[in-house]
Image (tube, grey):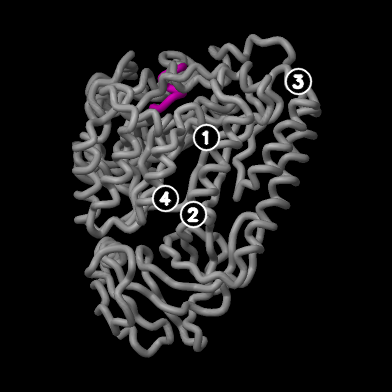
Amino acid sequence: MSQSRTYQVRTYGCQMNVHDSERLSGLLEDAGYERAAEDATADVVVFNTCAVRENADNRLYGNLGHLRPAKDANPEMQIAVGGCLAQKDRGEIVRRAPWVDVVFGTHNIGSLPTLLERARVQREAQVEIEESLETFPSTLPTRRESAYAAWVAISVGCNNTCTFCIVPSLRGKERDRRPGDVLAEVRALVDEGVAEVTLLGQNVNAYGVEFGDRRAFSKLLRACGEIDGLERVRFTSPHPRDFTDDVIEAMAETPNVMPQLHMPLQSGSSRVLKAMRRSYRKERFLGIVRKVREAMPEAAISTDIIVGFPGETEEDFEETLDVVRQARFSMAFTFQYSKRSGTPAAEMEGQLPKEVVQERYERLVKLQDSISAEENRKLVGREVEVLVAEGEGRKDGEHRRLSGRAPDNRLVHFAATGTDGEPAEPRPGDMATVTITYGAPHHLVADSGIRAIRRTPAGDAWAVRNGRAPEPSGVLLGMPTVGAPAATTVSAGGCCDS
């Protein structure tokens, strides 16, 4: 294979898919491929698919259709389809799109380079779907998209049987990594300059079930707190059924575990939750929210909500609105119920008309947006330390702003100047101290200038990746309370950055 062959990975779906795509990129680069330029047609295009939403099939086949002219013009081009939809549809993909070269599943992503080469040599499509995990994906090469933040998978698969969800049948039963392997990966990432890790699993707080330790997840959080240089730890997504008090205590008592929780509600109606097979009820969910807020008053809690589950009545929907009002989520990912073949819910009676679901969805979004705006406005005047990000704000260039995440994971757009109005240039991965001046439903704004910049090893790592020399540490204004001893704090007034 020529060393000049290029690739592109197109990702759909959840954080697990995003992390899998980093592995697919790592595998391809390890095999000698190069990432294609953004405006170029790649020699190999890989679709990493999701099967959760009803229109996932249409989206995939539409995108495959758009690629067919390029494939016809260049028969040496290869198209591969992986992920959950590939695991579900299998050979149906090449029957519907015979110009696809490779189909692989969620359990054998490590086979992609071999399958591409086999398809090229044999001149026929390769469809390979495994029924169980070949090897834990974290052992595979990875091309991480960020120099300063990283996903770390602690488990794969799910043991739950939610009636609306097809993921367990596509990802398999839960498999847990050993704690030592997880911590070794985190330490290696920190040594490379990573400042923030997100522990990842389909049901992250059930971690330890495979090796019989119900407190394994809280122990893992506390162990992350002992890793020098690890500034921020997050995790997603926990299940309310498995959310125990020891996890709340670990969050509250471990300084680098961020005061942020994303915990899917799905419905506020206990009757609907039972039909969903969610194994908790409204009171249990609100009890967890209350305990988290008691332990961490500053915590931001976000959630997922499904509107229009089969049989949902107006009274059930009002129960959901009631939980939203009581919980006061910082944000909610809201979805209209989507029928998926192969799930019990798809066969349930009481499938709701589209117009009913749409009307309820709009009411929910309006309520949550108003709560998010109210909660964000409470933060005006508060000083926060933002982990500067790359590419978070679509209009940052237009408004002369940078963006980043506060400890509670709220998105902050901030003026790229010091408090004296002079330009300030923190790098992605650095920490910028700013004061919130405005709260919108989905973000915060800090336009009064950067009060201080803390240069970090994560910023150095970003600079090296982007062909820039790490900057001098500047003038020390005070040792940071959290983070790597090597990081320093410099003024953002424009005179001490050189």
Q: Is residue 406 above or below residue 215?
A: below
Mark with earlier residue (2, 3): 3
Q: Are marks 1 and 2 in contact (CB under 8 Å)?
A: no
Residue 40 screen position, x and y as percent: 40, 49
Secondary structure, magenta segment, majority class: helix
* Residue 129 in view of the camera: yes
Judge whether residue 76 can be spotted in this image. no
At a point 47% along the width and 59% down the height, the residue shown is: 405
Q: Of callouts 4 and 2, which one flags the residue occurring earlier in the amino acid sequence?
A: 4
The reply to whether discs 1 and 4 touch (Cβ–Cβ < 8 Å) is no
- Residue 104 on image: x %, y %: 34, 23
Q: Position of residue 59 (x, y in %)?
A: 56, 31
The residue under label 2 is which amino acid type?
Asn
The reply, left or right, for residue 406 in relation to residue 135 is: right
Structural distance between the alpha carbons of marks 1 and 2? 37 Å
Quarter of image, res 172 = top left
Q: Secondary structure at mark 1?
A: helix
In the displayed structure, 329 sits above or below 179; it is below
Residue depicted at x 61% and y 25%: 281
Mark 3 neighbour density, 10 Å: few (under 14) some (14–19) many (20 or more): some
Tell me the residue that label 4 is attached to. Answer: 252
**On screen, residue 165 above or below 469:** above
Question: Disc 1 marks which residue?
Answer: 66
